[in-house]
């Protein structure tokens, strides 16, 4: 190292390097952003200089920094002022009465006419005492002088009469393309808006916080506390992209960010993205473009996914999908296509196949988000493999609402859910949480769900598809780096790689299975900087 000494040394660790050439080691050294040595304690400690910080991790497991490759983080950062009624965040919320009580408490602090937004959890109606969502009439009673709505995940909300009036929704308002306005028996809107029908209400809401930067930084810091060093965040407008640039320029990113830019149902259009001439991974280690994002069907948690035989919602028809995928593909922009139900998955596969037939791009790494959650049959796996489409599953869906899948899509379809052991034979199995509006970002929790095959309520599903904890770590490190076009830069602990590091505070191989989901983190290092210490 000459006159340059490592800025940081980690010693006495059990390093899971994810490097096949040297899968285990005791210590590593960091200089600047990068790993400059991996080896035995003696080898690495000999490099220490007067300015080197040496951290003795006492035999703890050390892994590459973890990734979450599908989040909606910064778009939720503006919701810091939302009334918290998510039972996944506040277990004291158990009934519609509890939800209305928390909203009434907020009303006393908000001037008449200002919007009030409450943030609920997906499929919360199944868990509430009343087994239903609040009604428009109940919201009218609780909030008589303010437009108000409660979203339950990303795919459904309930609005009061003033909110509907504010955006001009009446009994004669037609359903928007890709959305539903629900009605009562008399034909009046009942307050429930699904998918694209939600957009006018969310855009009219004036309760959002002013600083996206502060909100995003706080959510990213929480992610860092769970060993996360990189997220792929879905963004919908220039404000969110500018906020991320501001954080990066100010050195305030505790987690590296790949931007997945939504080009339908967003303020950014496909032509505007294509005409810039940018391809992923354009950017820096800390902030880069990861591809374009679009959504074919409704959400699983909203019970609006396009499963055959069910009343699913198609948000993008095949013609628009084919046109969008082809435009991005020809421009060298990787597509990340939301497709949950089997009908939507087949549409996504068809669109990617057509684009590849037009101009073959073997390494463009198009992704199909949620493919692999349900009905990922041998035929679909073979087709995806042939056209180079990567499945991105969501074990958080399994953990939090997997119990409800049987009632929604049927026992036979649910029995084969999340077949990660099978998928990993042919694909990288990096996965994403769909956080933060639903639940917090937490790759350790999601890995644990695929190891134990247990939901939050203790239901065991498809146990033959269990993976090991180390396979789960590989998914969220080495596999995630490949999916993010970073396999030569990240995902393993080896010389020259970026110093993304997670130090676990308990032994995952000795930890009781019921405690794996909450396995604590001792330290997180992102690009050579310690971003979290327990």
Image (cartoon, rainbow, N blue to C red):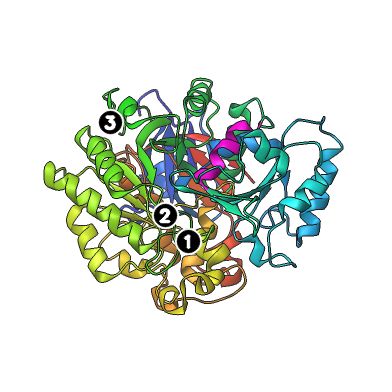
Secondary structure beneath dot 1 equals helix
Q: Which residue is mark 2?
A: 431
Q: Residue at x 31, y 65 (%)?
A: 423
Label 3: few (<14), some (14–19) or many (≥20) C-alpha neighbours in 10 Å: many
Q: Report if residue 53 lies within the magenta region.
A: no
Q: Quick one: 176 or 285, which is closer to the camera?
A: 176
- Against 183, is 324 above or below? above
Q: Position of residue 81 (x, y in %)?
A: 71, 36
C-alpha span from label 1 to label 2: 7 Å
C-alpha span from label 2 to label 3: 22 Å
Q: Residue at x 58, y 51 (%)?
A: 153
Q: Report if residue 196 lies within the magenta region.
A: yes
Q: Quadrant of the N terminus?
A: top left
Q: Position of residue 381 (x, y in %)?
A: 25, 64
Whichever of callouts 2 and 3 sits on the residue coming sooner in the sequence is 3
Q: Which residue is mark 3?
A: 279
What is the span of residues highlighted in magenta in the rendered image? 195-205
Q: Residue at x 81, y 36 (%)?
A: 145
Residue 233 - label: none
Q: Position of residue 5 (x, y in %)?
A: 43, 28
């Amino acid at each position: 190292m000459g006159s340059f000494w490592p800025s940081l040394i980690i010693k006495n660790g059990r390093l899971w390097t994810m490097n096949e050439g040297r899968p285990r080691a005791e210590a590593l050294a960091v200089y600047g952003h990068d790993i400059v040595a991996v080896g035995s304690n003696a080898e690495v400690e000999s490099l220490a200089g007067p300015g080197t910080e040496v951290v003795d991790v006492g035999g703890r497991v050390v892994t590459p920094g973890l990734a979450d490759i599908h989040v909606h983080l910064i778009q939720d950062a503006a919701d810091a002022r939302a009334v918290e009624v998510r039972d996944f965040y506040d277990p004291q919320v158990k009934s519609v009465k509890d939800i209305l009580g928390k909203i009434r408490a907020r009303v006393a602090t908000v001037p008449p006419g200002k919007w009030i937004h409450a943030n609920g959890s997906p499929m919360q109606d199944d868990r509430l005492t009343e087994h239903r969502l609040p009604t428009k009439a109940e919201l009218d009673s609780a909030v008589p002088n303010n437009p108000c709505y409660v979203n339950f995940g990303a795919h459904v909300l309930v609005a009061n009469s003033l909110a509907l009036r504010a955006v001009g929704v009446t009994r004669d308002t037609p359903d928007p393309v890709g959305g539903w306005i629900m009605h009562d028996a008399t034909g009046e809107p009942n307050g429930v808006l699904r998918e694209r029908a939600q957009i006018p209400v969310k855009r009219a809401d004036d309760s959002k916080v002013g600083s996206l930067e502060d909100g995003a930084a706080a959510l990213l810091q929480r992610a860092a506390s769970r060993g996360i060093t990189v997220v792929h965040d879905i963004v919908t407008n220039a404000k969110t992209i500018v906020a991320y640039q501001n954080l990066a320029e100010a050195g305030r990113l505790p987690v590296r960010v790949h931007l997945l830019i939504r080009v339908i149902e967003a303020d950014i259009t496909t032509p505007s993205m294509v005409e810039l001439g940018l391809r992923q991974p354009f950017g820096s280690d800390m902030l880069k473009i990861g591809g374009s994002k679009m959504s074919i069907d409704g959400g699983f948690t909203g019970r609006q996914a396009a499963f055959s035989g069910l009343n699913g919602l198609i948000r993008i028809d095949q013609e628009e999908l084919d046109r969008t995928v082809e435009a991005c593909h020809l421009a060298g922009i990787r597509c990340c296509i939301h497709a949950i139900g089997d009908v939507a998955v087949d549409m996504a596969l068809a669109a990617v196949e057509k684009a590849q037939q037009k101009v073959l791009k073997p390494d463009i790494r198009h992704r199909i988000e949620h493919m692999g959650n349900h009905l990922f049959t041998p035929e679909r796996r073979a087709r995806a493999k042939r056209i180079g489409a990567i499945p991105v599953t969501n074990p958080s869906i399994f953990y939090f609402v997997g119990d409800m899948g049987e009632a929604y899509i049927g026992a036979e379809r649910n029995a084969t859910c999340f077949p990660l052991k099978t998928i990993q034979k042919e694909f990288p199995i990096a996965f994403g949480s769909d956080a933060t509006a639903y639940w917090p970002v937490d790759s350790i929790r999601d890995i644990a769900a695929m190891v134990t095959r247990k939901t939050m309520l203790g239901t065991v599903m498809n146990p033959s598809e269990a993976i090991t904890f180390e396979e789960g770590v590989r998914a969220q490190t080495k596999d995630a780096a490949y999916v993010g076009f970073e396999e030569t830069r990240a995902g393993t602990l080896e010389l020259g790689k970026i110093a993304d590091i997670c130090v676990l505070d308990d032994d995952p191989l000795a930890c009781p299975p019921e405690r794996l989901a909450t396995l604590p983190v001792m330290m997180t290092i992102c690009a050579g900087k310690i971003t979290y210490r327990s």
